[in-house]
Amino acid sequence: MAQAIPVVTRADPTATRSALTEGYVSQPMIMAHGSWNWLQAIGTLDLEGLTLRRGELNTGGYGEGYVDRRHPHSYVHQAMLGAAKNVGGFSTSAFVGRGFAPFGSDDPMVRPFEKFPVNHHLSQILERVVAIAAVRRGPWIGELATFNGDEPLGPGSWPRFSRFGDSWSARLTVLPMDGLELSGSVASVKSPEVASGHGLDQQKSSVVARFNRQTSDTWRYAFAEWAHTNESNRGVRANSLSSLLGEAGLCRSGMIGALRLERSDRGEEDQLQDPFRTPRPSSDLSSLGVSRWTILSATLSAPVARAGFVTGRPFVEVERLAVAPGNPPGVFNANVRYGADRMWMLSAGVRLHVGGSMNDRMGRYGVAVPASGMANMTGLANNSGMSDMAMDHASTSDRCSL
């Protein structure tokens, strides 16, 4: 499948202390998966390095040298190879390649909002060279992984293979009832922001609850997560960053509406002449303090329209942002940086889609992917005996897919 989101965003105000309106193509992706006997492969090509070189307006967002913009992700977003096998009543799998470490929640792009939350770098560990072992028995899923700590320096940068194995993560998931999923995870990440390995280390933890249920005419979704990251230098804590986030969504008659409330900490860094960029690698290991972001987001998507083999789903999205000094506040002052401590963002665009269903659990592999209605229907569709009822559910999936 392939997707792209032409979008126009107005941020008022943002890091320039004024309102900005910009347009670009966000999330241009090509995704594929396949299997041959016991071998499975997953690949995702992200072309944001071509369309978002300056970053996407996303006030409050940060990471990989960008601030108040979402950075373009690596061209090789995922390239994973693995296998699954039943062993003594347990379902097991092993995957290696470049992708997501088993920590926190799924990629935000598979959730109902176009704008990424501020907590993206607190709640996911992605685009690493990773080896993952997973085991599943009944409603329980366990994952353990090792990977390189350094995050990408740019869309075309490769990881430092010499650092493979300097970081690890683990996640435990339970599926207590149909549609409900609970997980907890921990991670130790060595010097993610300094590729040479001499930067701040991170100790991370996360708890996630996810509800996803689809009937013949509706789709209901709810999601909540808590994430925490301690940044330290040789055991001395430099920052302590936390996030609470909740989302809820409903699809009926092809219309999708969703709300998100987030409260996240952001570590403040030196700025370059460009107010949307920070130095990489950091000039030193000091912190300018912490800011705390409270953001209410709402989105509404129209029913899918089709033109030949291309589908499009128009949407609007609005965010009300409030920012205040965190703990410790340091030198951060919202009125100095933005000219205000209350801000708006308004976005409008269309999700364009070609091909098969999008992987709605991006970030999980093998037996760690919880069974879902979408996954079951995909399996049925690959066989010749798909019932009329299953076809009805599949069409509902099409109407309610992002």
Image (cartoon, rainbow, N blue to C red):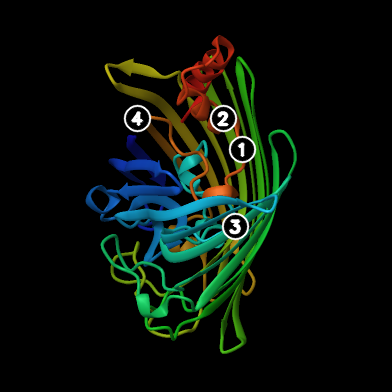
Tell me if label 2 and label 1 are in contact, CB under 8 Å: yes
Q: How crowded is mark 4: few (under 14 residues within 10 Å), some or many (20 or more)?
A: many
Q: Which residue in the protein does label 2 denote?
A: 376
First-in-chain label (4 vs 3): 3
User: Relative to 143, is 50 on the left or the right?
Assistant: left
Q: Which mark is residue 353?
A: 4
Residue 373 falls in image quadrant: top right
Give the CA distance from mark 3 to mark 1. 15 Å
* Residue type highlighted by circle 4: His
* Residue type highlighted by circle 1: Ala
Q: Where is residue 311 in the image (x, y as percent from the top left)?
A: 34, 23
Q: Which residue in the protein does label 1 denote?
A: 371
Of all residues, the one furthest to the bottom in this rendering is 234
Give the CA distance from mark 1 to mark 4. 24 Å
- Is residue 86 shown above or below 65? above
Q: How many labels does the image show?
A: 4
Give the CA distance from mark 3 to mark 2. 20 Å
Give the CA distance from mark 4 to mark 3. 31 Å
Q: Position of residue 221 (x, y in %)?
A: 63, 33
Label 4: element kind: strand
First-in-chain label (2 vs 1): 1
Q: Position of residue 199 (x, y in %)?
A: 46, 82
Tell me if label 1 and label 4 are in contact, CB under 8 Å: no
* Residue type highlighted by circle 2: Asn
Q: Which mark is residue 238?
A: none
* Residue type highlighted by circle 3: Ala
Tell me if label 2 and label 4 are in contact, CB under 8 Å: no
Q: How crowded is mark 2: few (under 14 residues within 10 Å), some or many (20 or more)?
A: few
Q: Nearer the viewer, mark 2 or mark 4?
A: 2
First-in-chain label (3 vs 1): 3
Residue at point 46%, 65% (across, down): 130
Q: Residue 134 carries which label?
A: 3
